[in-house]
Image (spheres, grey):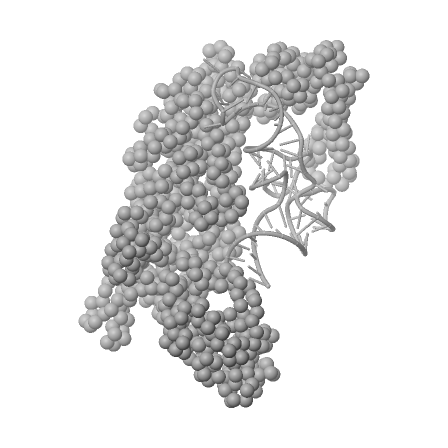
Amino acid sequence: MNQLPKAYEPADIEKKWYPLWENRGYFHSDPNSGKPPYSIVIPPPNVTGILTLGHVLNNTLQDILIRYYRMRGYEVCWFPGTDHAGIATESKVDKYLRAEEKICRDDLGREEFIRRVWQWKEQYGGKIIRQLRTLGCSCDWQRERFTMDEGLSDAVRKVFVELYRKGYIYRGQRIINYCPVAKTALSDEEVIYKDVAGKFWHFRYPLADGSGKYLVVATTRPETMFGDTAVAVNPSDERYRELIGKEVMLPLCNRPIPIVGDEHADPAKGSGCVKITPAHDPNDFQVGLRHHLKVINVMNADASLNASVPAEFVGLDRYAARDLVVRRMEELGLLEKVEDIRHAVGYSERGDVPIETIVSSQWFCRMKELAAPAVEAVESGRIKFHPERWAKTYFHWMENIQDWCISRQIWWGHRIPAWYNDANGEVYVGMEPPTAPGQWRQETDVLDTWFSSWLWPFSIMGWPQKTVELEKFYPTNALVTGPDIIFFWVARMIMAGCEFMKEIPFRDVYFTSIIRDDKGRKLSKSLGNSPDPLDVIATYGADALRFSIIYIAPVGMDIQYSNDKCELGRNFANKLWNACRFRQLQGPVSENYLSLPPVTELSSDEQWMLAKLDFAVESSAKAIEQFRFHSAAHDIYELVWSTFCDWFIEAEKQPLRGDAGERARALRVLDYALDRILRILHAFMPFITEELAHAMGFLEDDQSIMFAQYPEKSGLTFDEGAVKLVDGKFELVRQGRALKANCSIPDGKKVSFYLKAHDARTAEFLKAEQGSIAGLLNAERLEIGTDEYDPAAKGAAPSLLGELGTIYLPLAGVIDVEAEKAKLNAQRTDLAGKIAGASARLSNEKFVSKAPEAVVTEARRQLEEMRSKLERVETLLRSFV
RNA sequence: GGGCGUAUAGCUCAGUUGGUUAGAGCGCUACGUUGACAUCGUAGAGGUCGCAGAUUCGAGUUCUGCUACGCCCACCA
């Protein structure tokens, strides 16, 4: 066994263990094992993606669950993989080709472009998957999948065909969101609304009867006026009732359009007249349907104006057209006024440009029927959300669910399995191309990326084939993801699971916090405030990053992250390292550390330690099972640093210097505790715990802490009184140190203390602990008694009162009497106030009669205690006179 | 417009079903290398728990209203 270096250096250790784990197949699961299953599917990162702090948090949490349940004896499987991310990848590769080869998508043509994307994917894709290994994630890499793998593509086609045959999937002409950069339709969820400054133009539309009268209509989108096919007024609006059925002359086009009566027009808004552009506005589209209006699309795919508009506007970009329309209207004296407004404008999620709403022929999926069982699954509690409140968001969306626009006019993705026969107008939809004779032309559109993602929990396990993986691991246990994709992904997976598997895809959904910088800003490349996790790992270590991010993650709120917060985890790792180093310097591991001697043979300190350890074993396990990771991390941190290192190791330095029996027992308890601490911690800090478990001799070379059993409680029953006495003992030690510090005595200088116990039984305990207390105080001499101690007789002595007694620091002649008196007076005032409060409460008849018995008894006990404390303070004060 | 969240120490946050004297980490101050650890130790300063009411013997904790900040959904001709 090599001696541990003085400081923990994570780099080499992390590099050593991960390949070893992976090569030994530790991450690979056996669906045929008899163990109970525990499974998670990874939220598949984009194949173009690189590791961000969001991924670090998300995947650390999943790894904690996986490692925890593995140690609990489950057959765990964490299914990893990546998403083809249609639009994102297509534009990324397009950019790459433009930069590297000065060619673009359209130069290559569909087939060649797709070939090049695959090529790019093989070469650069999936980087994030390699980075997850650096973080220590114990994914079953042999089961890694990609959403465009053959099997997963089968699943997509099968689902499409099934839903088509069921009548849920249909092709229709409707208003959709359109991104002029990606030149494709988008779903409602891919539109981000931003509040921006804009203008509200009020135009005069002259009546067609030549009377010179006009109607005023207002718009934020002047360039779409060429698509106007009516002006609507409310039928109940007296001002315009007479005009319904008449026509206005659409300026610039000089095309007459009807005035229709429709409830959509709100008499209270503006002039009460509203222009109707069915091709470019969802509401107007509905009005158009009601009145059988013409639908005139005025835009090309890139959002420039098309040939349906007057010649001087054709080909103009939408914003150039807007300016020109306004100018021409003004010239015609038809611009009534312009208002500045702030309004929400839809932006394309990927392209970050304003989207267009246009009428277009697309494929849709009807969602209402699919939503019903998915709502029920969450309502009934079969699926639980953590934090629970996200269920409200989910219900709200599900109850108002709209049909899903699933077709995309791009090339990278699952091509829609539909074929058209132009000769007879027939449409064929099937898993395989049509075999019927005739000229068949396949649909050129591909499916929305999420149309494969929503099948992920079962397509990754081989569906539609019947596989042992599905049999064993579906439904999965937990899903860990961000609340930002609750609609995109979580809701749809639940729907798909219910529809195609007739079974929910997961039981618990844990929504992670969003990570921000230390100023509360979102992390983004453009702000340059997005740290590279690999740099952080290189600086602090993967364990440190993992532990820190869990430790600082507030419950259900955003995380304020900065790299220096990783010092917490690094320091913690180093503390643990040195605790083990201390133990190692004491000699080889105890033979029998896996068990404990009977309680009666343990010192009170040891009982104290083991009682705290038992508590932490239980509380941290419960916290993990309830998805309170942050609380588990805090419990363990406290256990290791404060309980084990600050107090227990320090206290055990005495028995370690004792006789052989005492020393052996101390070593055995230290080993027992350390072994368990490492196992509790392993899920959080996999590398250092594996290293230490081996270095300490807890494991053989061919073993791994990954499969060590998660600790159970010791099974011993500790004397509660004894544990409390130790708490009191440590309090006295703390007070003794405080006395020394208050008198400005350097730690290194040895002084004598006098300890007066409150009663004979306590005195007996303290006497038994005399050596221990003296050691912890680094005291020259420590006297213990119950007899009356007269500080004046030995010179004025500063003192402090604890639960068990009073500790004195006799300093003949050297202490500041006035300062001492001031301190005691402050203590007296404090106690008197509290006693007044407590006795007031106790003399309140209502409190005594209504509060639970235990609370009243406890209050009485405390009052008594404070009174006797006060008495002692006053005695001391008198002694100074 | 509808919904959700947050407000506790200088900063970031804990605080379980109401029950004594509200905690931690970082930062700050003082002292300190006693053979695990200066990535450390010891001690200390620092809080009328956003505001106003209500319920209760008792409220950081429950209820109502308000203020501030943040997020989501919808609408905006």
Could you tell me which residue is drawn at 71 percent across and 29 percent down? A861
**In the image shown, does A718 or A748 lie closer to the viewer?**
A748
The quarter of the rendered structure image containing the N terminus of chain A is top left
Could you tell me which residue is drawn at 74 percent across and 39 percent down? A847
The quadrant where residue A102 appears = bottom left
Q: Position of residue A254 (x, y in %)?
A: 45, 83
Q: Quick check: A39 left or right of A652?
A: left
Could you tell me which residue is drawn at 47 percent across and 36 percent down? A566
Q: Position of residue A779 (x, y in %)?
A: 60, 13
Q: Position of residue B31 (x, y in %)?
A: 60, 20
**Vertical side of A771 occupied by A506: above or below:** below
Could you tell me which residue is drawn at 39 percent across and 44 percent down? A51
Q: Does the rendering let one see residue A394?
A: yes
**Vertical side of A802 occupied by A388: above or below:** below
The quadrant where residue A37 appears = top left
Residue at the extreme front: A331
The quadrant where residue A491 appears = bottom left
Residue at the extreme left: A437
**In the image shown, does A457 or A795 lie closer to the viewer?**
A795
Q: Position of residue A524 (x, y in %)?
A: 45, 49
